[in-house]
Image (tube, helix red, strand yellow):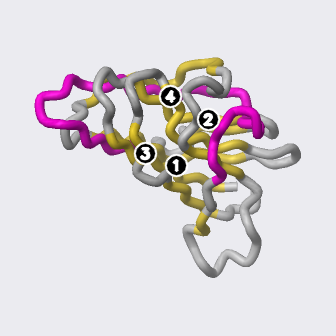
Amino acid sequence: MAGIKWVVESDEISSGTSKVTILQVASPSGYRQAIREWSCSLNAPAGSPPCLVQVYRQSPAVSADGGTPVTIKKWNTQDGLSSHVTAEENFDVSTQPTDDDELFGEEVASVGGGYTWQAPEGGEIILNPGEALGIVITATVATKVKARFIGTE
């Protein structure tokens, strides 16, 4: 790993009322990524029930999945190289990436709620070449969601 730190955030997205991938990061062929943090914040109408927030290893998005590309930002502007990680957000409900292993699953308050996971020292989630990780929300009431990954290549 070259040590390039990066961050990617989704726009504020409406979850709808189905299981949907809000944000996905993918490690391209020949590169590994260490995920140091992921988070999401939720904003549903008053009185809404909690949402299920899950993080899955997923099949990397392809154009048919209906996601929108997201710009990866360098954490440190002095890093001379660009990261090779890619990201997509706001996947169409009918064309979701395939979920593989669930790494996290939490019920999170949907009214002003949020959840952040930070890796313990040496405990980062490693994405090997060709692997992807997605933040997935299941809501019973349409909820506004923002999601974020922070990582290192």
Query: Quarter of the image holding residue 71?
Result: bottom right
The answer to whether residue 109 is left or right of residue 74 is left
Label 2 Cα crowd, 10 Å radius (few <14 / some 14-19 / many 20+):
many
Q: Give the residue at x 81% y 40%.
A: 129
Dot 3: element: strand
Q: Amino acid at mark 3?
A: Ile
Dot 2 falls on a residue whose secondary structure is strand
Residue drawn at x 67%, y 75% is 79
Instruction: Find out whether the residues at labels 1 and 2 contact each other: C-beta distance under 8 Å.
Output: yes
Q: Magenta stretch?
A: 40-69
- On screen, residue 61 versus residue 114, left or right, reads right
Q: CA distance from mark 4 to mark 1?
A: 17 Å
Depth check: give the residue in front, 85 or 5. 85
Kind of residue at badge 2? Leu
Mark 1 and mark 3 in contact? Answer it, CB < 8 Å: no
Real-space Cα separation, disc 4 to disc 2, in angstroms: 13 Å
Mark 4 / mark 1, whichever is N-terminal: 4
Quickly name the residue at label 2.
133
Q: Amino acid at mark 4?
A: Val
**Magenta-colored stretch includes residue 37:** no
Give the numbered dot on residue 13: 3
* Mark closer to the observer (4, 1): 4
The picture places residue 4, in percent across and down from the top left corner, at: 67, 64
**Residue under the point 18% across and 37% down:** 45
Q: Position of residue 114 (x, y in %)?
A: 29, 41
Q: Earlier in the sequence, mark 4 or mark 2?
A: 4
Residue 53: % across, % down? 40, 28
